[in-house]
Amino acid sequence: MTDIKIAPSLLSADFARIAEQIATVQAAGADYLHLDVMDGRFVPNITWGPKIIGDLRPLSPLVFDAHLMIVEPERYVDDFRSVGCDRITFHLEATCHAQRLLAHIRSLGAKAGVAICPQTPVFMLQDILDDCDTVLVMSVNPGFSGQQFIPRTFDKVRELRQTIDDRGVPCLIEVDGGVGERNARELVEAGADVLVMGSTIFGAADPATELQRIRSLVSH
Ligand code: DX5
Ligand code: ZN
């Protein structure tokens, strides 16, 4: 439990003060900046595209972790890579050709990830795990920050941990949605490697202190 990665989600940040908010979580020890890309079709919300991510890129050396909640992700991954996304994760439910897209993302020099919504069972990943650097398990239905964590996620993470360990693939398990002090430790004990947190961190009166508090909850 020593190398848990904390990924603040900018979806909950104040974009009028975005440079300051990024600097705050960076100084507090964040590992990734989680960037939620939504198209109003795959999910009922719209956020930002490559232009904004490219504008943010010079602000921080942190790993840019793009979570694409968009239909036809294969049309856009090159653009997200070219503006500096280090990890690119798309939804299994959004494409018929996940294996090809994972391989393509790796060929661009980025880490490739696939995300699953709460409806999608872990066994659907069996045949593409070798191609994944990340599996992102959604613990809410994607689209909005501040939603309630779905408890079934614990079992999904345990099952995925077992499968990954049995297969011996170096794939990280990322959990996204409703993560915070009430479930962070149990998620890590279940096998999570990366915790995405939006409202928990940016909704706190003091985001830096909150990040460090969660870090201490999962570090020993
Ligand atoms: C939701 C996004 C999340 C969101 C999480 O669809 O994928 O990354 O920002 O926000 P919280 O942590 O508030 O649930
Ligand atoms: Zn996300």
Image: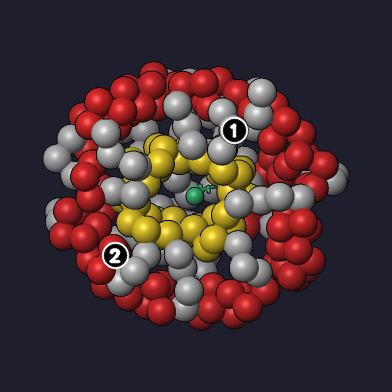
195 lies left or right of 18: left
* Residue occupying image coordinates x 77% and y 56%: 27
Could you say where residue 165 lies in the image, as x and y percent from the top left?
31, 28
Q: Is residue 141 visible?
A: no
Decide which of 2, 174 is in the foreground and name it: 2
* Residue occupying image coordinates x 76% and y 34%: 213
Assign the C terminus to one quadrant of the image.
Answer: top right
66 lies left or right of 212: left
Q: Is residue 201 above or below residue 118?
A: below
How far apart are the alpha carbons under marks 2 and 1? 28 Å
Residue matched to label 2: 105
Instruction: Specify which label sits upstream in the sequence, 2 or 1.
Output: 1
- Mark 2, ligand 2, within 8 Å: the answer is no
Q: Is residue 206 above or below residue 63?
A: above
Residue matched to label 1: 2
Colour scheme: secondary structure
Q: Residue furthest right?
A: 205
* Residue occupying image coordinates x 73% and y 54%: 25
Q: Amino acid at mark 2?
A: Ile
Could you say where residue 153 lies in the image, as x and y percent from the top left?
43, 25
123 lies left or right of 70: left
Q: Amino acid at mark 1?
A: Thr
Q: Is residue 188 visible?
A: yes
Decide which of 191, 46 is in the foreground and name it: 191
Describe the element under mark 2 as helix, strand or loop.
helix
Q: Quadrant of residue 126?
A: top left
Describe the element under mark 1 as helix, strand or loop.
loop
Circle on res. 69: none
Decide which of 155, 60 is in the foreground and name it: 60
Assign the N terminus to one quadrant of the image.
Answer: top right
